[in-house]
Amino acid sequence: MDLGVARLEDCALARAIEGEERPLVARGEVIGTWRKHNEALVMFLLRQRRSGRHSDRVDLKPGNAVYERLKAEILADAAGDEDEIHASINAKLDAMIARKKSLADWDDLAAGKPE
């Protein structure tokens, strides 16, 4: 199985390099040939064999310098100032309570209830 896969890889690489010969037909007759190169196959092989250089994907794993830098930035952002976060939540809750009270007062007024 391994030898078969190795042969397939070799054939794919040869096809990527040499291209594929295609017939050039005019009026039902073959008048020549031309080579078609498969760019998708070329990029696939480059991404598989040289992923660090030819891939849009970055393999981020613990220990990778980029991974560690991003992790530190995210943790620093997440930590934030707890007092500031609590103040923001409390302000939103106070605004919601005031709005609910205002709507209740408006409903009472509309129903003709005294204040």
Image (cartoon, grey):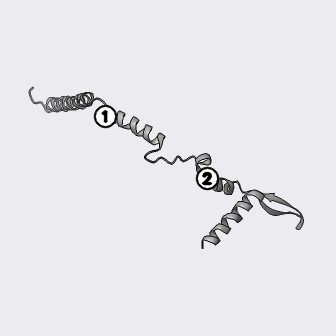
Nearer-N-terminus badge (2/1): 2
Asked whether, in this view, residue 111 is left or right of residue 14, the answer is left
In the rendering, at what x and y percent does residue 78 appear?
A: 33, 36
- Where, quadrant-wise, is the N terminus in this rendering? bottom right
- Number of the label disc, if any, that sits on residue 47: 2
In the rendering, at what x and y percent does residue 97 appear?
A: 18, 31
Residue drawn at 10 percent across, 30 percent down: 113
Q: How far apart in space, not on screen, are marks 2 and 1 (Cα)?
A: 37 Å
- Number of the label disc, if any, that sits on residue 49: none
- Where, quadrant-wise, is the C terminus in this rendering? top left
In the rendering, at what x and y percent does residue 20 appear?
A: 77, 62
| Front one among 29 and 18 | 18
| Front one among 93 and 111 | 93
Q: Is residue 81 above or below residue 2?
A: above
Total numbered labels: 2
Which amino acid, by three-letter code, is at mark 2? Arg
Residue designated by label 1 = 79
Q: Is residue 80 above or below residue 11?
A: above
Asked whether, in this view, residue 102 is left or right of residue 38, the answer is left
Residue drawn at 16 percent across, 30 percent down: 101
